[in-house]
């Protein structure tokens, strides 16, 4: 397979969505190409690190401001409710 | 001997908190906010690129959740619903900031030469990472580097990556949200993934096990 074709399939392969016909050809390539295997693994880890990694901390005061605003809105919507 | 088991308080599920919030329990709603505010802020911060807009989006997201709690279907995932509101809210602010009237965030009118598989840079630095993603994201220093790598992407690549890979929108949903074709989405996603991979592997790869990238010049 040519490099450009491989790259095109890379997305789909990472997502587990390659056309079965192409998949076999791609997997055959992968079986014999260690750098490509590592690239696929790198990409999967890259996605994981952004998807499942640590979220940002809220800047100082943001949390308080947020809760103040929400409490205010809540009261407007539930005028009779007790906290 | 006494076999008293200390009572471990079980965290209420999101559904339970939603139920309680719907019946007027502010504390339950605040608990939901505490659970998700960082994740909402994170998607907002990554999409808009700045703290000020991210805070606005965060507030708008939870206000919207508060106001539409009644129409939220209980059997759906609260976190998915909430993060979608945040994602679309962040895109809206981005559009507003750029003065773009409609759906498309794409300022290019002519076909974008970047949207071409032939011109995508091939992997250069290839090595297994020294640590797992879990280990890496525990550390403050690496977390900063990770966010820097993301911010270094062109916005048009970063947005596709955020929507598709991080927030889990489908290719179709991503295309619609950004005013792109599905083909555009796929090629931009590949660029984003490869660029991030390159950047992060240079930082976190095990240089002692570095491999030569395979140049696939011939038909195999």
Image (cartoon, coloured by chain):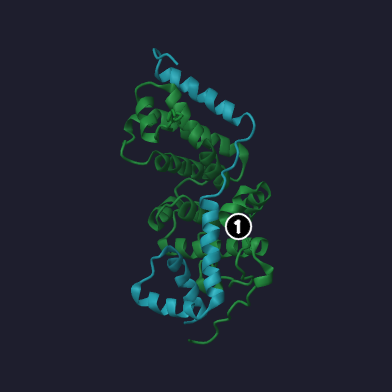
Chain colours: A cyan, B green
Left or right, residue B72 beside residue A39 = left
Quadrant of the image containing the N terminus of chain B:
top left
Res B3 quadrant in image: top left
- Residue A9's place in the image compared with B28, above or below, is below
**Residue A4: percent from the left, percent from the top?**
50, 76
Q: Badge 1: how crowded within 10 Å, few (<14), some, or many (20+)?
A: some
Near-viewer residue (B97 or B83): B83
Q: Chain of mark 1?
A: B
The residue located at (40%, 28%) in the rendering is B67
Near-viewer residue (A60 or B20): B20
Count every numbered label the image shows and give the total: 1
Determine if residue A45 is in view: yes
Res B25 quadrant in image: top left
**Residue B127: percent from the left, percent from the top?**
62, 69
Res B192 quadrant in image: bottom right
User: Which residue is the site of mark 1?
Assistant: B153
- Residue B153's place in the image compared with B214, above or below, is above
The residue located at (51%, 42%) in the rendering is B90
**Residue B63: percent from the left, percent from the top?**
46, 30
Q: Residue furthest front?
A: B1
**Residue A57: percent from the left, percent from the top?**
60, 38
Element under disc 1: loop
């Amino acid at each position: 397979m040519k490099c450009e074709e491989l790259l095109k399939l890379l997305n789909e392969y990472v997502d587990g969505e390659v056309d079965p016909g192409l998949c076999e050809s791609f997997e055959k390539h992968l079986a014999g190409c260690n750098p490509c295997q590592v690239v696929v693994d790198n990409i999967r880890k890259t996605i994981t690190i952004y998807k499942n990694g640590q979220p940002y901390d809220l800047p100082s005061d943001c949390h308080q401001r947020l809760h103040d605003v929400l409490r205010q809105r809540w009261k407007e919507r539930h005028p009779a409710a007790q906290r | 001997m006494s076999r008293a088991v200390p009572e471990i308080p079980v965290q209420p599920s999101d559904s339970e908190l939603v139920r309680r919030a719907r019946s007027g329990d502010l504390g339950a709603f605040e608990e939901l906010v505490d659970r998700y505010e960082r994740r909402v802020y994170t998607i907002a911060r990554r999409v808009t690129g700045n703290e000020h807009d991210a805070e606005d989006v965060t507030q708008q997201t939870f206000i919207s959740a508060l106001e539409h709690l009644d129409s939220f279907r209980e059997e759906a995932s609260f976190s998915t619903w909430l993060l979608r509101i945040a994602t679309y809210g962040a895109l809206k602010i981005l559009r507003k900031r750029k003065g773009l009237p409609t759906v498309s965030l794409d300022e290019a009118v002519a076909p974008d030469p970047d949207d071409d598989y032939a011109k995508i840079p091939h992997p250069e630095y290839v090595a297994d990472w020294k640590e797992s993603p879990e280990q890496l994201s525990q550390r403050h220093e690496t977390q900063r580097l990770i966010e820097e790598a993301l911010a270094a992407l062109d916005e048009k690549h970063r947005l596709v990556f955020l929507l598709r890979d991080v927030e889990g929108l489908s290719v179709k949903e991503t295309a619609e949200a950004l005013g792109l074709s599905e083909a555009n989405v796929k090629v931009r996603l590949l660029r984003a993934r490869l660029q991030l991979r390159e950047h992060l592997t240079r930082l976190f790869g095990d240089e002692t096990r570095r491999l030569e990238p395979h140049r696939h010049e011939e038909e195999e």
